[in-house]
Amino acid sequence: MKQAKVFIIRPRVLVAEERESYPLNLVAVLSSVENINVEKRVVDIDFLYRQGASFSAICGDLLAEISRIGLPIVGISVNDAALPEALYLAERIKERAKNSRIVLGGPGVYFNSAGIMAEFGHLVDYIVRGEAERTFPALVSGILKGKAGEPVPGVIDFPAVVRMDDYAFPQYDRLPPSLYGTGPGVEYIPVLAGAGCANQCKYCSTSNFWGHKVRYKSVERVVREISFLKSLGVSKVELVHDNLFHDMTYVGRLAGTLMRGGVRVSWACSGRADDFDMAAAPLLARAGCRRIFWGIESGSEKGLRVLNKRLPLESSVRKVRKVSEKYPVHSQLSFIYNFPGDDLESFKRTLELAFRLKSENPGKVQVALNNFLALSGAVFTRNALLKKSRYLIRQMNLGPTFAKRVAGARELFSFFYKPGNITSLGEKFRLTRLNFVLNGFPGTIAVLLRKYGLLDTLRCFQKSEDLEVAVRAMVRRDGDALPGSLTDIFRFEYLGAVPPARPAGKKRTGCWRPRTIQRIYQ
């Protein structure tokens, strides 16, 4: 029998703003094949590349190793952003090892599996749909026995696992979290608490991916995994679920179990504000909840209707404000712009709400303004492609060969396209810098918004990479001096200067105070 070896790979993510993350999916797949008698290796190309390794060097070493194996089984984890590079790797591997078995899995191939096999079947042997924890080990066993077969050529589809506790226990020690703890952006190590969403937001593919069902691991299983991570020196974990707050009773039981068991960790989670029960907030805070990701998405009721978000905006914002003000919990707020049906008025309301929430509590609120992404499987994407809507290709570092492939098969690479509805706004203004400006200079921006309005403020940052130069040039244009209050706010935010001490017996005038920003919109 030929020597066999299983490779589990994460490609680079070709999106500059994508943050580094611990690859829980690789750990899950590795754990699922642990009992199969075959050598295994995990290769996180994205991590190695972010650590400074040359992509060509990483690929060269990997290809050299694969070419020495008699029967290499290569599993590549794919999301929408990684699909071009996953196919590039498959092509290179097939060139060096024609006897290799290339297996793709993940949300980036789930919805387009038939099309990918039709277009790239000469590079890909199998696509596993659904939960890889079940499909991949079955496929590997079949390949090793020479009995791998499927009803549709190349596509293997298993029903979803009903009990998530049946997943193999994740072997975090095989991919030490301490390695990722040294990288930028990796603060919380993920623990899978469940999956699925019952909502029908048009921009998201989660609900369709999980069949509109919501599932959870048992509280006991989640606590065991957290305890294991603690034994590895981890003190911060993220409870991964598409909407953890769908079942607040479950969340309360989990928080109570952590407290009674003395499992002291800081933890983060994400969910919908309208599902969150404020009565549970004190318990969650005592149990170690320190960060919540809230998907607000739009600052206008019209925008929410277009997105089919069905989120009561005012009450949701009140909850976010209260949680951040009253408890030691940081809030991360997500907003989307440039989606199909978005317009300038909706965008202005979204931006104003984002600035307002940040400026009210700058130390505990982070805001993410996200350009719309055409995710495969999302209603927006399917409708736009069917209607042949005007999509513009994104500028990504794909290389000439794969740039042509993306341009020639937009149904398979929808992620790399953007709708043309308010694209002119994105071309006029450097919107990719909004998150940096918003989170770094909320007080400065709030003053500029009130004095000059949205569009002029955006033009200010388009003209210069240097914020100080941009602000001062904008004020000089109107022949004004930089207002004293703005000078002090700007000095504090941009230069990190400490406000001067108050002379004895005199009132401090014109100096920045922490509560100044909170009063800007009043």
Image (spheres, helix red, strand yellow):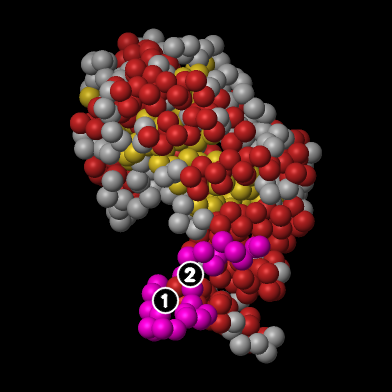
The quarter of the displayed image where residue 27 is located: top left
| C-alpha span from label 1 to label 2 | 8 Å
Is 85 situated left or right of 61 in this image?
right
Q: Residues within 10 Å of mark 2 (few under 14, many from 20)?
A: some
Q: Point out which mark residue 141 bears.
A: none
The residue carrying mark 1 is 499
Question: Which amino acid is tagged 1?
Answer: Pro
The residue carrying mark 2 is 513
- Residue situated in front as seen by the camera: 391 or 465: 465
Verify whether residue 514 appears in magenta: yes
Question: Which amino acid is tagged 2?
Answer: Arg
Q: Position of residue 80 (x, y in %)?
A: 53, 39
The quarter of the displayed image where residue 448 is located: bottom right
Q: Position of residue 509 (x, y in %)?
A: 51, 81
Q: Is residue 221 visible?
A: yes
Q: Position of residue 515 (x, y in %)?
A: 51, 64
Which residue is at 50% across, 52% downward? 365
* Label 1 element class: loop
Give the residues in magenta.
Answer: 493-522
- Residue situated in front as seen by the camera: 382 or 302: 302
Q: Is residue 463 above or below residue 257?
A: below
Q: Is residue 13 above or below residue 4?
A: below
Verify whether residue 496 appears in magenta: yes
Which residue is at 51% across, 12% downward? 159
Quadrant of the drawing holding the N terminus? top left
Q: Position of residue 374 (x, y in %)?
A: 63, 42
Is 234 situated left or right of 351 in this image?
left
Circles 1 and 2 in contact, beta carbons < 8 Å: yes
* Label 2 element class: loop
What's the magenta bit mostly, secondary-structure-wise?
Answer: loop
